[in-house]
Image (cartoon, helix red, strand yellow):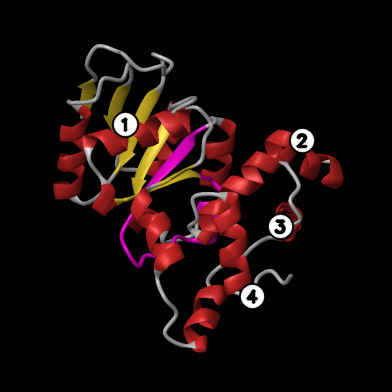
Amino acid sequence: MRTEIAAPTGTLDPDLQIVLIIPDDIRRYSVEGMFHSLDLPVTAQLITDIGDLSTFCNAQLIISCGIALEPVCEKIAEKLRAHHVHVLILVDSGDIVEPSWIDHANGFLDWTDLRPETLREAILDVAAGRFHVSASLARRSVTAPDQTGDATSQRASMVALTAREQQVLRLIAEGQSNRQVARSLSISEHGVKRAVGIILAKLNCPNRTLAVVRAIELKLLTV
């Protein structure tokens, strides 16, 4: 499938390619149909084998959560890094994205939020280097009440932060800016932004403040 997008009014690189990997036929047709109404200067192409990514460079990959429930193999991970592929994952409520995919993800969009305008917003955010989390994912994570203490422990066990992410989260909780965190950890500010984006995704939070609150609730962070 190759779909030419309508005349551009966005700010995307006209050479950007959107690669779709959506095994479910009905969902794939739905997303393909939405592309016809997007005013973005990009080309969308369907592939069935993620190994075909070697033919793309500086692409944006849109995949359904079914693919992201299994670990990403090192060969594919290397292709994602080498070809600068930005990954947007379409997720279902209740799905737990495999941590190795979270490390490569640049955004998450809930299928229940999927409409032409939300798809466009997610594509623009990811292409601009902004980490995207759709409204339903953020709302569900910060408003769902705990039924029991065991539920909290169970959710906490499903959130795995690396040592670096824990360091960044701790400094954010202390009120440090990205620049200050970068200086404290002797890493680049871009590295901090990347770590913050991954933390927000893992905790399903739309901003740093709610991420700290959620981490405290899950006992991932103590004050």
Mark 3 lies on a secondary structure that is helix
Mark 3 or mark 4: which comes first in sequence? 3
Q: Which residues are magenta?
A: 85-105
Q: Is residue 213 left or right of residue 27?
A: right
| Element on which disc 2 rests | loop
Evaluate whether residue 72 shows in this view. Answer: no
Task: Report the residue marked by disc 4.
Answer: 219
Q: Nearer the viewer, residue 149 or 35?
A: 149
For the image, the number of numbered tags is: 4
- Residue 66 inside the magenta-drawn segment: no
Instruction: State the image coordinates of residue 44 (x, y, percent, origin top left).
Output: 29, 27
Q: In the rendering, at what x and y percent does residue 15 appear?
A: 41, 15
Q: Is residue 73 above or below residue 142?
A: above
**Mark 4, residues whose alpha carbon is within 10 Å: few (<14), some, or many (≥20)?**
few
Dividing the image into 4 quarters, which one contains the N terminus? top left
Of badges 3 and 4, nearer the viewer stands 3
Q: On the image, numbered disc 2 is attached to which residue?
A: 188
Instruction: Please tell me whether mark 1 sits on a helix, a strand or a loop.
Output: helix
Looking at the rendered image, the quarter that the C terminus falls into is bottom right
Mark 4 to mark 2: distance in Å?
A: 28 Å
- What residue is shown with label 3? 173
At label 1, the amino acid type is Arg
